[in-house]
Image (cartoon, grey):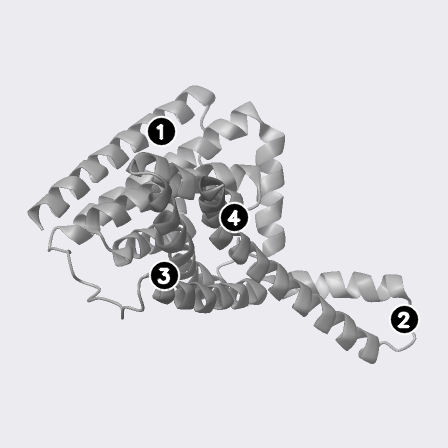
Amino acid sequence: MKKFLQYTGCLLPLIAGLAAQLAAGTAFSIFLSAQISAQMPGASLQEIQSEAITRYMEAAPFLILISHIVTIFMAALWFYYVSGRKLPENPLKGFSLFTVPVMLLCMIGLQYTCSGILMVISHLSPDLLTGYIQLLEASGLESLSPVTLIATLFFAPIGEELLFRGLTLHFTKRITSRFWIANLLQAVCFGIFHANLVQGIYAMIMGLVFGYVREKYQSLYASILLHALVNFCGTIISGLLLPDLEPGLGMSFAILCVAALVLAAGLKLVEKDTGKN
């Protein structure tokens, strides 16, 4: 029974994060419906719903930003109590002059490992990738608006790292002394958090790497830094390094393998960097 409760406890950050997103979306939907009803007093329920959906999609980036802020506030307060009410440590503790180049190498390897996975999926299951792209377009994450950039590059890494490499990894390490099991559990939760299969697959891989970096540096700041760099690469510079490529399945596998080797080299250097410190 005690073990069952411990495993259930590992899911609480995931549930809390999903609940925060759902609460923000529901509250905003109610607000929009009330606003539209006041502005269109003679409109039918169907017209109000149609207008609400249109405005909701237009405001999706702003809503995502709000949900990230709510997540940060909730997770930071929770993490503060879980960590024994300790104030945040020096962000540079455990870092060296070697750390930033190592993180950049990990960023490139991780980003293009995930890009390679998407290329392979595009050949093996085109419909699955098409649905994922449509979801991104509908959410407004494809646009490079200031709100989207702030949410993706700043707030998302902080909130998600607090939830998963902070709280979830803390709880999973209580269950097992084997780090790889604890890291896998939190990475699976991180994948589920993204709520769609394609993004969930590569989010789980990212979660494994973020968890490894957090453990090696013994610092949540390290995984936040890498997370922010990966989001920056995926949002801004990814298209510059692989502009509109449509490689065949064989080339997609080749890109995936090369990127995975780069990532492995980066993680090996993480081990050396943390060994020095």
* Marker disc for residue 255: 1
Q: Are marks 3 and 4 in contact (CB under 8 Å)?
A: no
Q: Are marks 1 and 4 in contact (CB under 8 Å)?
A: no
Name the front one of labels 3 and 1.
Answer: 3
Please name the residue that numbered disc 2 is placed on.
Answer: 43
Three-letter amino acid code at the position of disc 2: Ala
Real-space Cα separation, disc 3 to disc 4, in angstroms? 21 Å
Q: Residue furthest front?
A: 1
Three-letter amino acid code at the position of disc 1: Ile
Q: Secondary structure at mark 2?
A: loop
Name the front one of labels 1 and 4.
Answer: 4
Three-letter amino acid code at the position of disc 4: Phe
Q: Who is closer to the viewer here, 168 or 270?
A: 168
* Percent x, y of residue 155: 42, 63
Q: Secondary structure at mark 4?
A: helix
Please name the residue that numbered disc 4 is placed on.
Answer: 193
Which badge, 1 or 2, comes first in the chain's sequence? Answer: 2
* Marker disc for residue 82: 3
* Marker disc for residue 128: none
Question: Which residue is pictured at 41% across the width and 44% down the height?
Answer: 186
Question: Which residue is pictured at 77% across the width and 70% down the height?
Answer: 33
Q: Who is closer to the viewer here, 215 or 227?
A: 215
Q: Secondary structure at mark 1?
A: helix
Which badge, 3 or 1, comes first in the chain's sequence? Answer: 3
Q: Is residue 42 above or below residue 57?
A: below
